[in-house]
Amino acid sequence: MLGTIKDPTLFLLLSSVGISLFGSVGYGIYTTVGPSSYKLRDTIKDHARMHELGIAHAHNRHNHNEAEHIH
């Protein structure tokens, strides 16, 4: 037999978390495919291109030996 919950605190907490999660996912999808999505950059592609040019991990304009350099 199920009893009724007289204190709505748990219900309010779970519903607010659910609404926040649903809103965040919705906003992420809207940002990805929405009208301003053309402004997004593919940072992985940019980084790969910088590797091809040899400038991906250049620091302070000095040539560091990559084996000795700790990231």
Image: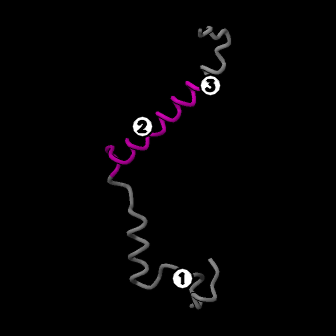
* Marks 2/1: CA–CA distance: 38 Å
From the image, tell me which residue sits under label 2.
26
Q: Residue at x 43, y 80 (%)?
A: 51
Front position among marks 2 and 1: 2
Q: Position of residue 47 (x, y in %)?
A: 43, 72
* Marks 3/2: CA–CA distance: 20 Å
Q: Quadrant of residue 53?
A: bottom left
Q: Quadrant of residue 10?
A: top right
Q: Residue at x 40, y 75 (%)?
A: 48
Q: Is residue 62 visible?
A: no
- Number of other residues with Cα within 10 Å of mark 3, as a class: few under 14, some 14 to 19, many 20 or more: few
Q: Quadrant of residue 9?
A: top right
Residue 19 colored in magenta in the image: yes
Coloration of the structure image:
one colour
The mark that comes first in sequence, 2 or 1, is 2
Q: Residue at x 53, y 33 (%)?
A: 20
Proximity of marks 3 and 1: CB atoms separated by less than 8 Å = no
From the image, tell me which residue sits under label 1.
58
The mark that comes first in sequence, 3 or 1, is 3
The mark that comes first in sequence, 3 or 2, is 3
Query: Residues in magenta?
Result: 14-37
**Image label count:** 3
Q: Position of residue 30 (x, y in %)?
A: 37, 41
From the image, tell me which residue sits under label 3.
13
Residue 49 vs 63, above or below: the answer is: above
Residue 9 colored in magenta in the image: no
Query: What element does badge 3 sit on?
Result: helix
